[in-house]
Image: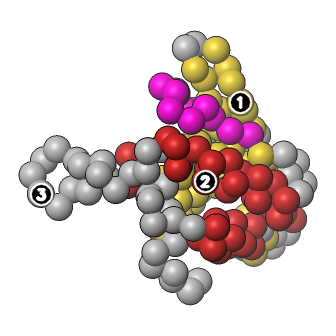
Amino acid sequence: MRLVIQRVKEASVSIGGTLHSTIGQGLMILIGICDEDTDEDIEYLCQKVVKLRIFDDSEGVMNLPVTEVQGSGILVVSQFTLMASTKKGNRPSYIHASKPDFAVPMYEKFVSRLRELSGKEVQTGVFGANMQVALVNDGPVTIIMDSQLRERF
Protein backbone atom coordinates (compact mmCIF):
# COMPACT_ATOMS: atom_id res chain seq x y z
CA MET A 1 0.00 0.00 0.00
CA ARG A 2 1.38 3.37 -0.98
CA LEU A 3 0.36 6.76 0.29
CA VAL A 4 1.18 10.25 -0.85
CA ILE A 5 0.32 12.54 2.05
CA GLN A 6 0.13 16.28 1.48
CA ARG A 7 -0.40 18.96 4.09
CA VAL A 8 -2.94 21.29 2.52
CA LYS A 9 -4.63 24.62 3.11
CA GLU A 10 -7.63 23.17 1.23
CA ALA A 11 -8.46 20.25 -1.05
CA SER A 12 -11.45 19.03 -3.01
CA VAL A 13 -12.68 16.33 -5.36
CA SER A 14 -15.09 17.02 -8.21
CA ILE A 15 -16.69 14.40 -10.44
CA GLY A 16 -18.28 15.37 -13.72
CA GLY A 17 -18.06 19.05 -12.81
CA THR A 18 -19.88 18.57 -9.50
CA LEU A 19 -18.14 19.08 -6.15
CA HIS A 20 -18.09 15.75 -4.30
CA SER A 21 -15.95 16.42 -1.20
CA THR A 22 -13.95 19.24 0.26
CA ILE A 23 -11.77 20.02 3.27
CA GLY A 24 -10.04 23.10 4.56
CA GLN A 25 -6.69 22.77 6.32
CA GLY A 26 -5.60 19.18 6.79
CA LEU A 27 -4.29 16.16 4.95
CA MET A 28 -4.87 15.12 1.35
CA ILE A 29 -4.01 11.42 1.01
CA LEU A 30 -3.67 9.52 -2.26
CA ILE A 31 -3.74 5.74 -1.77
CA GLY A 32 -2.63 2.91 -4.04
CA ILE A 33 -3.44 -0.70 -3.16
CA CYS A 34 -1.78 -3.94 -4.30
CA ASP A 35 -2.85 -7.57 -3.87
CA GLU A 36 -0.23 -8.22 -1.18
CA ASP A 37 -1.72 -5.60 1.15
CA THR A 38 -3.27 -6.78 4.41
CA ASP A 39 -5.19 -5.43 7.38
CA GLU A 40 -1.79 -5.13 9.07
CA ASP A 41 -0.71 -2.69 6.35
CA ILE A 42 -3.85 -0.63 6.95
CA GLU A 43 -3.20 -0.51 10.68
CA TYR A 44 0.47 0.38 10.23
CA LEU A 45 -0.23 3.23 7.81
CA CYS A 46 -3.23 4.63 9.66
CA GLN A 47 -1.25 4.70 12.91
CA LYS A 48 1.58 6.52 11.13
CA VAL A 49 -0.73 9.05 9.46
CA VAL A 50 -2.50 10.11 12.66
CA LYS A 51 0.82 10.48 14.52
CA LEU A 52 2.73 12.21 11.71
CA ARG A 53 3.92 15.52 13.18
CA ILE A 54 3.79 17.80 10.15
CA PHE A 55 1.66 20.73 11.37
CA ASP A 56 3.16 23.82 12.97
CA ASP A 57 2.94 24.37 16.71
CA SER A 58 2.74 27.84 18.31
CA GLU A 59 6.48 28.28 17.70
CA GLY A 60 6.15 27.56 13.96
CA VAL A 61 7.83 24.16 14.26
CA MET A 62 6.33 21.09 12.57
CA ASN A 63 5.46 19.33 15.78
CA LEU A 64 1.72 18.56 15.70
CA PRO A 65 -0.23 15.66 14.18
CA VAL A 66 -3.52 16.24 12.37
CA THR A 67 -5.36 15.03 15.48
CA GLU A 68 -4.16 18.08 17.43
CA VAL A 69 -5.04 20.71 14.82
CA GLN A 70 -8.46 22.27 15.37
CA GLY A 71 -10.67 22.38 12.30
CA SER A 72 -8.40 20.15 10.25
CA GLY A 73 -9.77 17.52 7.90
CA ILE A 74 -8.64 14.51 5.93
CA LEU A 75 -9.43 13.71 2.30
CA VAL A 76 -8.56 10.24 0.96
CA VAL A 77 -8.57 9.53 -2.78
CA SER A 78 -7.88 6.16 -4.41
CA GLN A 79 -5.23 6.29 -7.12
CA PHE A 80 -4.20 3.03 -8.76
CA THR A 81 -1.45 4.82 -10.71
CA LEU A 82 0.58 5.02 -7.47
CA MET A 83 1.29 1.34 -8.03
CA ALA A 84 2.81 1.99 -11.47
CA SER A 85 5.94 0.16 -12.49
CA THR A 86 8.25 2.20 -14.71
CA LYS A 87 11.12 -0.29 -14.77
CA LYS A 88 10.82 -1.15 -18.46
CA GLY A 89 10.06 1.18 -21.34
CA ASN A 90 8.19 4.46 -21.21
CA ARG A 91 4.65 3.23 -20.70
CA PRO A 92 3.86 2.54 -17.02
CA SER A 93 2.59 -0.89 -16.12
CA TYR A 94 -0.21 -1.15 -13.56
CA ILE A 95 0.12 -4.90 -13.05
CA HIS A 96 0.74 -4.37 -9.31
CA ALA A 97 -2.46 -2.38 -8.76
CA SER A 98 -5.29 -4.43 -7.25
CA LYS A 99 -8.54 -5.01 -9.08
CA PRO A 100 -11.66 -3.39 -7.56
CA ASP A 101 -12.97 -6.61 -5.95
CA PHE A 102 -9.95 -6.54 -3.60
CA ALA A 103 -9.06 -2.84 -3.61
CA VAL A 104 -12.48 -1.38 -2.77
CA PRO A 105 -12.89 -3.25 0.55
CA MET A 106 -9.28 -2.40 1.47
CA TYR A 107 -9.85 1.27 0.63
CA GLU A 108 -13.03 1.32 2.72
CA LYS A 109 -11.24 -0.36 5.66
CA PHE A 110 -8.44 2.21 5.41
CA VAL A 111 -10.89 5.13 5.48
CA SER A 112 -12.87 3.60 8.35
CA ARG A 113 -9.77 2.93 10.46
CA LEU A 114 -8.45 6.43 9.76
CA ARG A 115 -11.77 7.86 11.00
CA GLU A 116 -11.56 5.78 14.18
CA LEU A 117 -7.98 6.71 14.98
CA SER A 118 -8.15 10.38 14.06
CA GLY A 119 -11.58 11.18 15.48
CA LYS A 120 -12.11 13.31 12.38
CA GLU A 121 -14.58 13.16 9.53
CA VAL A 122 -12.65 11.67 6.63
CA GLN A 123 -13.85 12.81 3.22
CA THR A 124 -13.32 10.60 0.16
CA GLY A 125 -13.35 10.50 -3.57
CA VAL A 126 -15.25 7.79 -5.46
CA PHE A 127 -13.28 4.64 -6.14
CA GLY A 128 -12.71 4.17 -9.88
CA ALA A 129 -14.28 7.48 -10.89
CA ASN A 130 -12.63 10.05 -13.13
CA MET A 131 -11.99 12.67 -10.46
CA GLN A 132 -10.62 16.16 -10.62
CA VAL A 133 -8.58 16.77 -7.48
CA ALA A 134 -7.71 20.32 -6.49
CA LEU A 135 -5.49 21.32 -3.60
CA VAL A 136 -3.37 24.08 -2.18
CA ASN A 137 -0.27 22.37 -0.81
CA ASP A 138 0.85 23.99 2.44
CA GLY A 139 4.61 24.34 2.70
CA PRO A 140 4.79 22.38 0.50
CA VAL A 141 4.86 19.34 2.74
CA THR A 142 4.57 16.01 0.90
CA ILE A 143 5.36 12.63 2.47
CA ILE A 144 5.43 9.26 0.69
CA MET A 145 4.81 6.09 2.68
CA ASP A 146 4.90 2.47 1.51
CA SER A 147 3.77 -0.28 3.85
CA GLN A 148 6.14 -2.73 2.16
CA LEU A 149 9.17 -0.62 3.14
CA ARG A 150 8.16 -0.19 6.80
CA GLU A 151 10.51 2.72 7.28
CA ARG A 152 10.88 3.85 10.84
CA PHE A 153 10.32 7.58 11.06
Q: Earlier in the sequence, mark 3 or mark 2?
A: 3
Q: Which residue is mark 2?
A: 106
Q: What residue appears at the point 84 percent right and 46 percent down from the top-left corner? A: 121
Tell me how far mark 2 sits from mark 1, CA to CA.
Answer: 20 Å
Q: Secondary structure at mark 1?
A: strand
The label number, if any, that marks residue 88 in the structure image? 3
Which residue type does callout 3 highlight? Lys
Q: Is residue 125 magenta?
A: yes
Image side of residue 140 versus residue 44, left or right: left
Q: What residue appears at the point 75 percent right and 58 percent down from the top-left corner? A: 114
Q: Earlier in the sequence, mark 3 or mark 1?
A: 1
Q: What residue appears at the point 16 percent right and 44 percent down from the top-left corner? A: 91
Which residue type does callout 1 highlight? Ser
Q: Is residue 140 above or below residue 47?
A: above
Q: Would residue 56 be seen by someone viewing this image from the given angle?
A: no
Image side of residue 83 versus residue 62, left or right: left
The label number, if any, that marks residue 21 in the structure image? 1
